[in-house]
Image (tube, grey):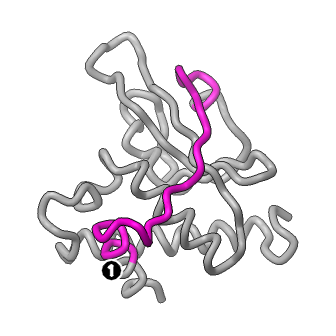
Amino acid sequence: MLKKDINYEELFQIVSDFRHAIIEAKNNREFERGDRMSNFPYGCCDDSCDLLGYYLYQNYKIKTKQGNGVYEDENPENTTNHAWLVMENGTVIDITGTQFKYCAGFSDEVYIAKENSFYKNLRDKRHYANFNIEEDSRLWSDFNTILEHLH
């Protein structure tokens, strides 16, 4: 069990539902034009972490931090930052890893497990507190749009 009240299967379903709600909103073009969430899962991993981290804490009291690191390989054009959530017990939650499927072999839409070699090999890794999305009108709007698609 990852949390006293929530087991792995339940957490996976909660996170998968949240990811699916983002995709529904994106496909319906409900995010503002130019909003990074309109490109989900590309280029919005930090915003996705803040949104999901807020949701997990507000609804399930699951505390997370944002992990951040730099992905790089032999092709300099593939060098980019990546962000993911880390639970208190070290479990990684990542809903945007599929943006690395061609350069790092990441294929799972939702990754919930201990840190694997992908995360271990990131450069300049750090952990940050999740941003309070209530303090940013764009993120708060994105969050409420996502909530409309949660079933």
Q: Nearer the viewer, residue 42 or 140?
A: 140
Image point 41% across, 49% down: which residue? 45
Taking the image as shown, residue 142 lies to the left or right of residue 32, namely right
Give the image quarter of residue 116. top right
> Secondary structure beneath disc 1?
helix
Q: Seen from this angle, which residue lies furthest top? A: 74
Position of 52 relative to 149 (above/below): above
Q: Seen from this angle, which residue lies furthest front? A: 135
**Which image quarter holds the N terminus?**
bottom right
Q: Residue 120, position in %: x, y?
A: 64, 26
Image point 61% across, 73% down: which residue? 13
Q: Nearer the viewer, residue 85 or 20?
A: 85
Question: Disc 1 residue type?
Answer: Thr
127 in the magenta segment: yes
Total numbered badges shown on the rendered structure: 1
- What is the magenta range? 119-143
Mark 1 residue crowding within 10 angstroms, few (<14) / some (14–19) / many (20+): some
List the residue tagged with mark 1: 145
Q: Nearer the viewer, residue 108 or 86?
A: 86
Taking the image as shown, residue 126 lies to the left or right of residue 18, namely right
Position of 25 relative to 115 (above/below): below
121 in the magenta segment: yes
Give the image quarter of residue 135. bottom left
Position of 90 relative to 144 (above/below): above
Q: Residue 124, position in %: x, y?
A: 54, 22
Taking the image as shown, residue 92 lies to the left or right of residue 78, namely right
Taking the image as shown, residue 143 lies to the left or right of residue 61, namely left
